[in-house]
Image (cartoon, grey):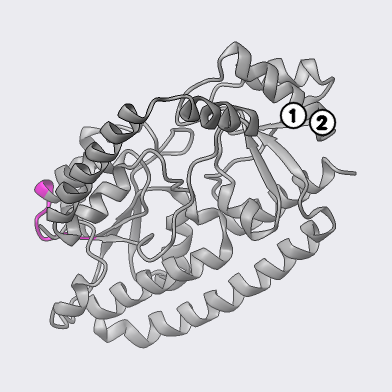
Amino acid sequence: MKRLLIIAFLMISSLNAQIKDVTVSILSQKYFVEKIAGDKVNVNIMVKPGFSPATYEPKTSQMKKLADSSIYFAIGVPFEGSWLEKFENTNKNMLIVDTSAGIEKLAMEKHSHHDEDEHEEHEDEKNHDHEKHDEHEEHADHEKHDDHDDHEEHADHHNHEGLDPHVWNDPILVKTQAKIIYETLAKLDSKNASFYKVNYEKFLKELDILNVKLSTILKPFEHKAFLVFHPSWGYFAKRYSLEQVAIESQGKEPKPKELIELIKDAKEHNIKIVFVSPQFSQGSAKTIAKSINGSVHVIDPLAKNWEENLIQTAQKIADTYR
């Protein structure tokens, strides 16, 4: 199975064929591919604007359109876990490439530190027999996992609910993704390899400049916390030494007790703005904002103009501390 192959194209002889269409999972990837491919390819987006890549279900018309794609650039978002194999079966000649491979994934943000502490305390109260049982199960699961081939291991990572897929919100991590995109295009379309290389190298410089801009905006606020509904900004927060506090955890709204703790955390950090994404409900965010005499603002992790959006997001986060 050629699913999620990152190195696969290195084993393929140069096809020297024109790539007409490629498909990507999310809008940000379209930006990346077009930066490198320019007008050499047409980029189709699977998750349409306004929809969540956590729960998206492709339409029949999109599945039919896959027949024209030479490459599918995956990125590790949850819906891919259920759909990549179907994509492959729809177009067996389409190469599926995981652009997030090689990136060390973060754990998804919990509701709050208090919630984590409670969990740890609860774990300590468990008896030794239960711990042994867990160790035995963990060992068995590990052995079973080792039996999987590399491709299935990649697929497992895409399905892993505990890992944060939002690697496109960190410009330095995007350099890794850009390299994979460039090498894939250059290998499959060797006659345009030099064109792709020039654009790729230009894009890398743009990413470095963007990183400096974001660092300049956010450096005065290092180690400050910001409150978001959906934890889309973990890599962004880590890159610029911020603390993301998430309301939602792994697709679940906070329970009443967790909501109280989030309000407490917000007050302790003197947070007055709750950030939400257009793709998610704003109910819990509005409740917290009202309780802290704050307001709800929108930052979109899947906006059309990726670079401009990251700069605007940095400015909005910085404004919360002024």
- Mark 1 lies on residue: 265
Q: In which quarter of the image is the N terminus?
A: bottom left
Relative to residue 223, is residue 131 drawn left or right? left
Secondary structure type for disc 1: helix
Three-letter code for the amino acid on which mark 2 is drawn: Glu
At 76% from the left and 23% from the top, the residue drawn is: 264
Note whether residue 111 is visible.
no
Q: Position of residue 104 (x, y in %)?
A: 44, 60
Relative depth, front residue between 52 and 147 = 147
Q: Residue 306 appears in which quarter of the rendering?
A: bottom right
Relative depth, front residue between 234 and 304 = 234
Three-letter code for the amino acid on which mark 1 is drawn: Asp
- Is 264 included in the stretch rendered in magenta? no
Tell me the number on the disc at residue 45: none
At 20% from the left and 74% from the top, the residue drawn is: 9
The boundaries of the magenta stretch are 89-96
C-beta proximity under 8 Å, tags 1 and 2: yes
At 50% from the left and 25% from the top, the residue drawn is: 122
242 relative to 291, above or below: below
